Amino acid sequence: MIEQKLIDQLCYGDSQWTYRGDLKTEEDLWKNFRYILEQNNKDRLNGESLSDAEFDQIKNQLQFSSFYKAGEWLVGENGKVMVHVQRNTEKLHLVVMNHEHIAGGSSVYEVINQYRALNTDGSVPVRDRRFDVTLMINGLPMIHIELKNKEHSFMDGFYQIQKYIGEGKFTGIFSAVQMFVISNGVDTRYFSAASDTELNPKFISGWLDRDNNPVSNYLDFAKCVLRIPEAHEMVARYTVLDEDSKRLILLRPYQIHAIEAIRDASKRSKSGYVWHTTGSGKTLTSYKATRNLLMDIPSLDKTIFLIDRKDLDTQTSQAFQSYANNDLVDVDETNNVNDLKNKLKSNDRQVIVTTIQKLQRLITKRLQEDTPEYNRIKNLRIAFVVDECHRAVTPSTKRELERFFNRSLWYGFTGTPRFAENPYPQLGDLPRTTKDLYGECLHKYTIQNAIHDNAVLGFQVEHNGPKNMIDETDLAMYDNEAHMLKVLDVILNKSFYKLGFQNGKGRTYEGILTTSSIQMAQKYYELLKRVKNGETDLVIDEKIKQILPDFPKFAITYSVSENEEGSKVNQDKMKESLLDYNSMFGTKFDMSQIQSYNTNLNKRLARKDAKFKSRREQLDLVIVVDRLLTGFDAPCMSTMFIDRQPMGPHDLIQAFSRTNRIFDKNKTYGQIVTFQAPILFKEAVDNAVKLYSAGGINGAIGAEWDEIEPAFKKSLIALRVSASTPEVIPSMSKKEKEVFAKMFQNFDRLFAQFKSFTNYGDSMLKDYGITLEEYDTYAAHYKNIIEMLKEERHKVDDTDPETPVIDFDYELMAYSHTKIDYEYIINLIQNIVNPENTDEVITPELRQKKIDEVVSYIDELRKDNPKIADIMSSVVYEIEADDNKYRGQSILNIVENIKHECVDKAVTDFCLTWFTSKDEVMYAATHYRNGEIPNESAIKETADFGSYKQSQEKTLPKFKYYSRMMAELRELMKEEIEPLLVR
């Protein structure tokens, strides 16, 4: 019913989707695609149909190895997506799709359902699948929708898509898909297409209207997002190819609304600014806005993306270039002022990326008044887009540029606008707020909006500075080794959960330590070296060393000419730290390559390239003064350690926002720890957050220790009331188990928060009356119960007021074991078989180094799970022997299939021995948790004692047959099956 209603909605009205109930198989889709291609290219084909051999050429071009490769092709050539066919001596260029024909022209919009994805590879034990609803443009599947009923979570659709991708169902004509939609009717989300191992639930987005109100009902979502032209625009105009990470990015709704607001303003010749909170993807939005302005507004001669010179050695320019590399719009970065002048003089309509400094120099030093060149450039109709507009362009510089380019439009992007409460300093009659400088706010998306939508994380702030000081600004209290060692003790020994040690090797997070001056940064760097070398009283905890023996790996960055007086000293110190860095990572930077060093450091910290997923290429801490506190994006950066006095509101929020990017399920907050002026800092933080979340701080700032600690104690009491010890849980009634599950979720959430504070230590749990082992046992029973309740969910009477509301999508947050991570190793193996996903030149030596690293991780895994380790070892052995083995295939799927075969063999052997039902034993195998076989009675009922008796020379009596069979099944489950269920 849900499916039919969606199709009716999609086909309702003029020029919408056409339902094609006759298209059910891949063969049907290829025939349909061929027909549309021939109709749209009659002239190019000279009226002749394509021969089968010619169409085979086309099919080969449409077998994409990844969704990203399909995205590259779909950009097209000058807006036209082409295939090329050799016909005798002539090469035919056929248009598959024309992005200028959105909602008209040659575009054909069709919707299909219940497509049969067949298993064409007989060697793989995978079932045929049926897809729900797919939207096709000109015969190519572009948007795929998986639907669930209200009894299921929309996330079940996500896991189903992930499974189908791993099984190879999105190949052939379906390899062109760019966007997925999942819904259970009342909750609807979308995300960009990616491989099964790269799909991340954290990047699923809901839809918002222009005022940031959620649109979650599937039919309302279809009206807003899946109509024509919106759906075509989504895949043609609002998809970005990130060349650095080789992935597709679909813009989030607030990004699309901002771009449309700029387009509308430019049509009215109005300037303005976009307030999108830091961390919500402003560079990406500003890139698309800059590019789309040129395409949408014919009267514009150029669009200029303007950045500050300081941003060249952060990521802004690199990110912009990474998005632009596959674009059909010509995006050029200027090398020097002459280059900028030539680009402005040329007749090409292009996007120009340049610095404010080059532009100033051009108009003040390089152009002679009243020359043709001067007049041509001065009279250009230009739209300027300014990233981080509050600091890239000062009010006086903007006035100077506006007076020269008197036909210009200006669009500023900022996460931290200047308001009347925090204006620019008074300078004559110059504007002092962002509104005065740029015009009206065209679109707003605050911290609270972003946190609510899971676009960024909130902050957890700890103020650890000295208490009860008469003067918190007395710097003598902080500029000494005793204070610095206290700071380092917190970073090194009390940030276990903040820095993600619970995730295991290669998956830990990073921190930034920011200080008040270059001299203090250098002192910290030298002191940290001494601590690591065992030359101080401060010792790194054994618990830390067990997980990361090389912790901490750290670096330092600052501007070597920032402090002219001390620049000689700064250069000497920087030389030393470059030598340390080179020795740590095998690089060769010297003082003449500071910018290259900073670029390398940024990339290493960002970890977006596959190379930096490996522990040997990672850093734990970077020491800075002001560098990296703005415009720097590293999702794995979790913690900002601040040993300096409070900053102003916009500087504070900018710095905090380095930590609140979404990364993985264990990173739930951006963590902030301050070490000076606790009272002044708390006041400064509260004021800054109020200012930039349009009012309140609720949701943006997490509760502090004084609130969490009593709440944790209370939740432990409630947990003990629901289940006094883990041992009583198996004998509880279903109703009692539901209450326990609810109480445990609440306890787990608070325990995770509790553990993330620097005040916390595992040893203090005894005082609260619980141990980590006991928590682990509770967690094991909880997982078992949740599985059982999920299966029975549809039988639950929702009207029963006694039934506790359990969040079935809740993932345990405090449950952590630092065993080597299964998926982490899978990803490392995937990077060996798909080296094209990294920028590294993979020499045989480097390939062997990567294999050796994987083998060492597998050896670590073997201590906990020899079964999985053996499977992985066999896969790696095959890859080592054959470079092309598994090339382009999903390693996750290969390992899962081998696991499945091992389980199947173990179950089959057991059934042959004891004459039991394979279906029942397989059910037990896939639902076995914590020593419990869920369908014991069914296995006994279906066991065939008569056949067993006939097959054996020496048989057990009937009463012993059942007890021995179940004892052996338990042993089989524990020894053979359970280790294989790990993921």
Image: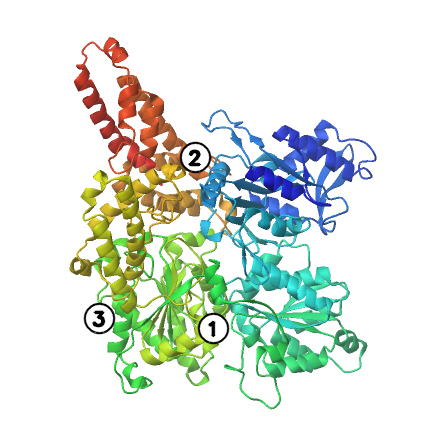
C-alpha distance separating marks 2 and 1: 52 Å
Q: Are marks 3 and 1 in contact (CB under 8 Å)?
A: no
Residue at the spot 73% in from the left edge and 79% down from the top edge: 367
Total marks shown come to 3
Mark identifier at residue 894: 2
> In this rendering, would 48 be left or right of 513?
right
Q: Residue at x 47, y 71 (%)?
A: 654
* Nearer-the-camera pick, 136 or 113: 113
- Neighbour class for label 1 at 10 Å: few (<14), some, many (≥20)? few
Q: CA distance from mark 3 to mark 2?
A: 50 Å
Check disc 2 and report its element: helix, strand or loop.
Answer: helix
Task: State the residue position of label 1.
Answer: 695
Say which element carries label 1: loop
Q: Which residue is mark 3?
A: 536
Instruction: Answer left or right for 571 relative to 280.
Output: left
Q: Say whether marks 3 and 2 touch (CB < 8 Å).
A: no
Q: Are marks 2 and 1 in contact (CB under 8 Å)?
A: no
Label 3 packing within 10 angstroms: few (<14), some (14-19), many (20+) = few
Q: Give the number of the mark in front: 2 or 1.
A: 1
Residue type highlighted by circle 1: Gly
- Residue type highlighted by circle 3: Thr
Q: Where residue 953 sits in the image (x, y, percent)?
A: 20, 9
Q: Position of residue 576 (x, y in %)?
A: 37, 71
The vertical placement of 401 against 599, above or below, is below
Q: Earlier in the sequence, mark 3 or mark 1?
A: 3
Front in this rendered view, residue 838 or 409? 409
